[in-house]
Amino acid sequence: MPTPAYDETNIFAKILRGELPCHKVYEDDVTLAFMDIMPRADGHVLVLPKSLARNILDADPGILGLLITRVQKIAVAVKSALAADGITILQYNEPAGGQIVFHLHFHVLPRWKGVQLRPHTGVLEKPEVLEGFCQKIAAALKAA
């Protein structure tokens, strides 16, 4: 079965074009990272390439190499900024693999001993809470 074409109306494409706002943690020529508005953990960050790829299955390998270095950089900053005990990195592909938004992205989730991930319930976090985490993580990135 052929892979569906990239849908330029997906929410991440709209964020990349500046049509929708986000709490931006990091941006460069390859990557945009921002706070997940329905976080499964405090400080949950999404990292995505600026290039158009539905998921890891159709992404340009050269972009993937550049992207994963940014995922690592952001994960280190999230762990440091939030004094997390660990980090979980998630990446889903296709509906059967759990993908909901069809633009390649990685979830960077800070983890603490004894604290479970919250379920994906669709509940929006308060903007001021997201902005607080965003500022802490962005400051850690600048200090690195």
Image: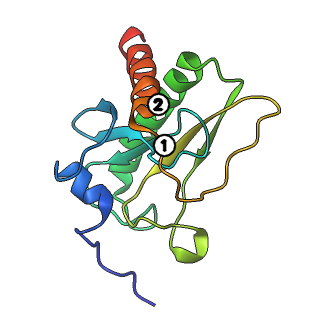
Residue reaching furthest top?
143
- In the image, residue 67 sits, relative to residue 75, either above or below, namely below
Q: Residue 37 location in percent, x, y?
A: 44, 46
Residue at image coords 54%, 24%: 76
Q: Residue 58 location in percent, x, y?
A: 39, 67
Q: Residue 127 location in percent, x, y?
A: 39, 37
Q: Amino acid at mark 2?
A: Val
Mark 2–mark 1 distance (CA, rounded to whole Å):
7 Å
Q: Residue 98 location in percent, x, y?
A: 58, 68
Q: Nearer the viewer, residue 121 or 113?
A: 121
Residue at image coords 53%, 54%: 123
Q: Secondary structure at mark 1?
A: loop
> Which residue, given by chain and number where applicable, does mark 1 sit on?
125
> Which residue, given by chain and number where applicable, does mark 2 sit on?
129
Q: Nearer the viewer, residue 1 or 88?
A: 88
Residue at image coords 48%, 48%: 106
Neighbours of disc 1 within 10 Å: few (<14), some (14-19), many (20+): some
51 on left or right of 45? left
Q: Amino acid at mark 1?
A: Glu
**Which mark, residue 92?**
none
Neighbours of disc 2 within 10 Å: few (<14), some (14-19), many (20+): few
- How is the structure coloured here? rainbow
- Give the quarter of the image for residue 141: top left
The quarter in which the C terminus is drawn is: top left
Q: Secondary structure at mark 2?
A: helix
Q: Are marks 2 and 1 in contact (CB under 8 Å)?
A: yes
- Give the quarter of the image for residue 6: bottom left
Count the numbered circles shown.
2
Residue at image coords 54%, 54%: 91
42 on left or right of 104? right
- In the image, residue 9 sits, relative to residue 109, either above or below, namely below
